Image: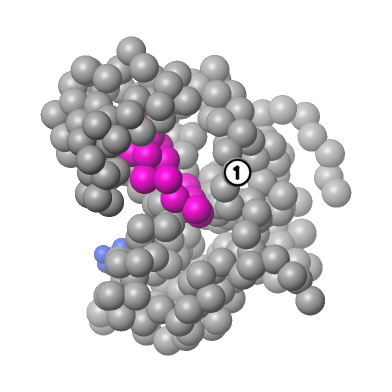
């Protein structure tokens, strides 16, 4: 028995868009507090959908979910979940909507009921953590892709979540910024699931890596074959097989 707190528990979760094929097919997944799990899989395998189901943005067509040890089914259950789990969207433009960077980062804490001063303090601290202090007054929509990515992460972290769901956080990041992200993630005392196509980044930021294919999370023995197949073309740094 694992004595740590089971934070996210998915039991045979399936999902299909109306009239469409199954995008998630009997997915089972457990995230314990302190876990850092990587999730890899080809485009269209259902990774983003899985995150949206966990956040209650999409309703599963079958299966059971418990988050923070409580069953979650209805919108009001998910409202609580969204206060404690931070989702970094795959597309930064889904995350950022304020004119300036500081306003974007202040928005979350304000929305959680903090005073304007508190929210500004938290936002400034978070921007500093990510090396973005000089970005406060920048116009959000004029930032580069990589800069938007980091500011998006700041908006998520400013809400002081207990768990992060990171959907391809390295997209558009140059090498120094990627290093910064590895360092920030290792410093944070957070549980997370991280979607990435980059095996070497995942190897440095997670303890275990799950493979997803056609809406299913592969079992260990299937996944080994999968990694062997995909690892070398994806990696840029020499690495060993387990
Ligand atoms: N709004 C939608 N309506 C219908 N199909 C969708 C919609 N959004 C995503 N899909 C389909 O769901 C599948 C899984 O998508 P997604 O979860 O985004 O995959 P991944 O993140 O692994 O690349 C894909 O086949 C995609 O085309
Ligand atoms: Mg995706």
Which of the 4 image quarters holds residue 234?
Answer: top right
Residue 211: horizontal and vertical position, in percent?
Answer: 63, 60
Residue 90: horizontal and vertical position, in percent?
Answer: 37, 46
Residue at the spot of label 1: 189
Task: Looking at this view, name the residue that lies furthest to the top.
Answer: 134
Q: Secondary structure at mark 1?
A: loop
Residue 202 belongs to the span the image colors magenta: no
* Left or right position of 25 against 226: left
Question: What residue is at 53 percent from the left and 76 percent from the top?
Answer: 69
Circle 1 crowding by C-alpha within 10 Å: few under 14, some 14–19, many from 20 = few
In front: 223, or 67?
Answer: 67
Residue 192 visible somewhere in the drawing: yes
Question: What residue is at 36 percent from the left and 58 percent from the top?
Answer: 83
* Left or right position of 140 against 41: left
* Left or right position of 217 against 68: right
The span shown in magenta is 150-166
Q: Is residue 238 above or below residue 174?
A: below
Residue 141 visible somewhere in the drawing: no
Residue 140: horizontal and vertical position, in percent?
Answer: 21, 26
Which of the 4 image quarters holds residue 147?
Answer: top left
């Amino acid at each position: 028995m694992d004595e740590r707190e089971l934070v996210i528990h998915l039991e045979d979760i399936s999902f299909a868009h109306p009239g469409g094929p199954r995008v998630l097919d009997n997915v089972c997944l457990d995230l314990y507090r302190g876990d850092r799990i990587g999730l890899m899989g080809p485009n269209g395998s259902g990774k983003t959908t899985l995150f949206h189901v966990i956040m209650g943005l999409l309703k599963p067509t079958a299966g059971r979910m418990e988050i923070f040890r409580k069953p979650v089914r209805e919108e009001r259950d998910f409202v609580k979940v969204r206060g404690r789990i931070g989702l970094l969207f795959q597309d930064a433009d889904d995350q950022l909507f304020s004119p300036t960077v500081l306003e974007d980062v202040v928005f979350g804490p304000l929305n959680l009921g903090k005073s304007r001063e508190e929210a500004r303090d938290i936002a400034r601290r978070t921007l500093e953590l990510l090396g973005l202090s000089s970005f406060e007054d920048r116009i959000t929509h004029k930032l580069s892709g990589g800069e938007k990515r980091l500011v998006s992460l700041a908006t998520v972290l400013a809400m002081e979540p207990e768990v992060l769901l990171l959907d391809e956080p390295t997209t558009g990041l140059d090498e120094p910024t990627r290093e910064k992200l590895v360092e920030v993630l290792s410093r944070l005392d957070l549980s997370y699931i991280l979607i990435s196509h980059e095996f070497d980044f995942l190897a440095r930021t997670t303890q275990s890596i799950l493979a997803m294919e056609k809406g299913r999370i592969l079992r260990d023995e299937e996944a080994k074959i999968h990694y062997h197949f995909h690892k070398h073309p994806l990696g840029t740094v020499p690495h060993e097989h387990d």
